[in-house]
Image: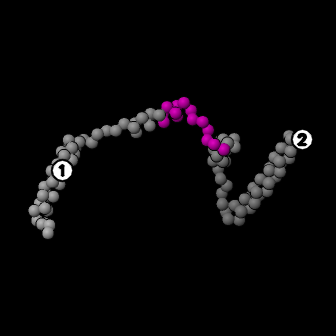
Amino acid sequence: MRREAERKRKEKHEKAEAEREELRQSIRDKYGLKKKVPEEENMMLNNDDGGRVGRKKKTPAELAAEANADSDDDEFTMPKNMDELKNKVQDIPQKLAQSVGEVTEKCSLQ
């Protein structure tokens, strides 16, 4: 019973697809369009995952490549001018104290 229902469903689907193809052909004839290359359609059908909802599992090679890519991102490289940046950061408190001193000399509280 189940197989017969499946067969009827497939026949119904094939009939509907044939009707759609006739309609497509009439539109192509009316507007002078060319039919898509069957190779492209086959490529699209080959990419079908059999009605899966989720994506296919990754191969071990894909997993290894992904792990290598992640490990490269985790590594941090120091800037080439690190010494220069350190000196600038160390000079900030001195410059700040100097400017605060200049401001306090110019201003007097009453």
Res 48 visible: no
Q: Which mark is residue 93?
A: 1
Which image quadrant for residue 77? top left
Dot 2, how many residues are within 10 Å of its Cα: few (below 14), some (14-19), or many (20+)? few
Q: Which residue lies furthest to the bottom in this view?
A: 110
Above or below residue 30? Residue 70 is above
Tally of marks:
2
Between 91 and 30, which is closer to the camera in this rendering?
Answer: 91
> Position of 63 compared to 87: left or right?
right
Q: Position of residue 6 (x, y in %)?
A: 83, 44
Where is 106 relative to 9, above or below?
below
Q: Is residue 19 visible?
A: yes
Say which amino acid is labelled 2: Met
Relative vertical location of residue 78 with respect to residue 13 in this rendering, above or below:
above
The mark that comes first in sequence, 2 or 1, is: 2
Judge the density around disc 1: few (<14), some (14-19), many (≥20) Cα neighbours within 10 Å.
few
Residue matched to label 2: 1
Q: Which of 79 and 106 is in front in this view?
A: 106
The N terminus lies in which quarter of the figure?
top right
The residue sitting at 47% across, 34% down in the picture is: 67
Which image quarter holds the C terminus?
A: bottom left
